[in-house]
């Protein structure tokens, strides 16, 4: 049920494999896979939930008080207590629990007074929820290239800048920090708010400062594969009191309920001139999340332990480019992403799947992966994929080279070593194979092992 918390063992050098030996033949070609048990992911039940968390949710169910605005004062509700703990954890003045990470993003844009119809700059590599939240807030996504480490490219943002841009929405995608400090300075220079989509990076830090605290507001998710998990849900954090009040009103604090969030003073607005969008969190989810907060530091250590073990053991593998952090330790560690420059990342991912490791080529032609910007058809005036890819050619190229492996905090050191063996095995077999043009789709009817998952979420 729970990941263990033992110290990471130093990576051991492994002898080079010889693909001519039967034991080194790829499972893709009829050999024995590295592992036969399913790769642990949240959708197979590999979630970091303890009995105390389950009891907290059951206690909230038994209370029969499911709506966050009942007869109790704010500080006695599960949502209110959860928000107080979030403020302490992030060191922010305000926190608001809502129905999803997408809701938190849209509320942050609207509450920051970004004019409807504005362009909102965001990276071309993100989950579809990012441009969807921009649309939900009545604005238009304005896509920016990412660099070879899949971070929002500030130089490209400068080149593309135009007067209609009303905000910058930076994404800490797949748990890796973007250069939030530089982007915050640029946003200030341009006179627009920086909003952080920290949905996939809950708890990660950049130079000792938690992601989500560099801009006007930070948005987070508590969906099933996140560092705090209640199935659905999210929250935003901010130090801007007026932004917070507007977000509270928009989320659904009607008929004076906004005042409950300001027990020591009058709120800066009534909220009557804002629509009510009913994006609140309920008490059952908040109870579960509040209990999980007690073990969040442990879970963050496990993410780092697993990632560091895998990345260190694969650092010397030729032909793959492991994603580099913008600063030491500036990542969550919930995904292992690498590129296969000039190679066939689709084949590499399929071979890993057959070795028992869930893997996905982010930019595969035969996959409707919604982390690839050309699959956001609602955002364009054309459905011609080649035309859409040409809008961000560098990003398209990097994503077509990228392989994504989910890393649950529940992974054991043995699981991590299986991943290391599988990547080395596939890389060695690829290097020993005759050279040929990269494929754009499966060359044969390859299927993932039973129970293998397509990564969901950020």
Image: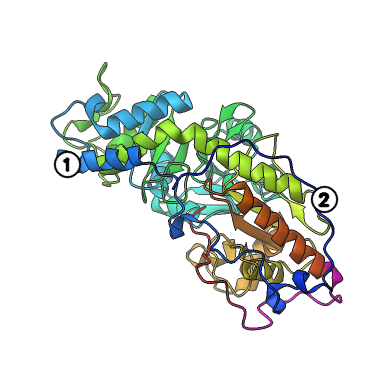
Counting labels gives 2
Front position in the image: 22 or 66: 22
Residue 45: image location, x then y, percent: 43, 56
* Residue 316: assigned label: 2
Residue placed under numbered mark 1 in the picture? 62
Mark 2, secondary structure of its residue: loop
Q: Does residue 150 lie above or below 340 as drawn? A: above
| Tags 2 and 1 touching, CB below 8 Å | no
Main secondary structure of the magenta stretch = loop
Residue positioned 82% across, 59% down in the render: 319
Q: Position of residue 272 (x, y in %)?
A: 22, 36
Q: Is residue 117 left or right of residue 401?
A: left
Q: Is residue 362 magenta?
A: no
Can residue 144 be seen at all in this image of the molecule?
Answer: no
- Find the residue positioned furthest to the bottom: 444
Q: Magenta region: which residues?
A: 431-446
Q: Position of residue 329 (x, y in %)?
A: 66, 35
Q: Badge 2: how crowded within 10 Å, few (<14), some, or many (20+)?
A: few
Q: Is residue 375 visible?
A: yes
Badge 1 element: helix
Which of the 4 image quadrants contains residue 73?
Answer: top left
Residue depicted at 54% across the width and 50% down the height = 408
On whether residue 442 falls in the magenta region, the answer is yes
């Amino acid at each position: 049920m729970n990941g263990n918390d033992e110290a990471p063992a130093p990576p051991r050098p492994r002898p080079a494999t010889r693909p001519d030996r039967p034991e080194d033949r790829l499972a893709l070609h009829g050999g024995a896979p590295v592992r036969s048990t399913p790769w642990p992911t949240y959708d197979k039940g590999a979630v970091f939930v303890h009995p105390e968390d389950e009891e907290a949710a059951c206690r909230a169910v038994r209370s029969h008080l499911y709506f966050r605005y009942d007869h109790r004062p704010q500080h006695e509700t599960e949502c209110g207590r959860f928000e107080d703990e979030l403020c302490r954890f992030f060191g922010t003045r305000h926190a608001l629990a809502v129905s999803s990470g997408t809701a938190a993003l849209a509320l942050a844009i609207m509450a920051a007074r970004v004019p409807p119809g504005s362009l909102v700059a965001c990276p071309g590599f993100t989950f579809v929820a990012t441009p969807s939240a921009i649309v939900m807030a009545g604005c238009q996504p304005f896509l920016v290239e990412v660099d070879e480490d899949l971070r929002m490219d500030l130089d490209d943002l400068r080149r593309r800048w135009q007067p209609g841009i009303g905000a910058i929405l930076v994404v800490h995608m797949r748990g890796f920090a973007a250069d939030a400090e530089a982007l915050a300075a640029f946003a200030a220079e341009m006179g627009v708010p920086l909003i952080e989509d920290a949905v996939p990076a809950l708890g990660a830090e950049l130079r000792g400062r938690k992601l989500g605290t560099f801009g006007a507001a930070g948005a987070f998710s508590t969906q099933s594969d996140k560092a705090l998990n209640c199935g659905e849900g999210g929250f935003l954090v901010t130090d801007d009191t007026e932004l917070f009040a507007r977000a509270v009103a928009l989320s659904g604090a009607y008929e004076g309920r906004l005042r409950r969030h300001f027990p020591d003073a009058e709120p800066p607005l009534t909220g009557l001139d804002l629509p009510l969008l009913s994006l609140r969190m309920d008490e059952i989810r908040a109870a579960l999340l509040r209990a999980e907060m007690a073990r969040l530091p442990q879970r963050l250590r496990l993410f780092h332990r697993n990632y560091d073990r895998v990345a260190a053991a694969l650092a010397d593998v030729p032909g793959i480019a492991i994603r580099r952090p913008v600063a030491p330790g500036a990542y969550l560690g919930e995904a292992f992403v690498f590129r296969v420059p000039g190679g066939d990342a689709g084949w590499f991912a399929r071979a890993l799947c057959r070795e028992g490791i869930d893997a996905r080529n982010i930019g595969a032609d035969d996959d409707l992966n919604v982390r690839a910007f050309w699959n956001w058809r609602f955002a364009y005036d054309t459905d011609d994929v080649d035309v859409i890819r040409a809008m961000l050619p560098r990003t398209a190229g990097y994503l077509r080279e990228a392989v994504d492996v989910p890393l649950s905090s529940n992974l054991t050191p043995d699981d991590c070593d299986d991943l290391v063996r599988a990547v080395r095995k596939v890389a060695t077999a690829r290097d020993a194979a005759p050279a040929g043009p990269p494929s754009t789709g499966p060359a044969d009817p390859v299927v993932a092992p039973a129970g293998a998952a397509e990564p969901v979420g950020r």
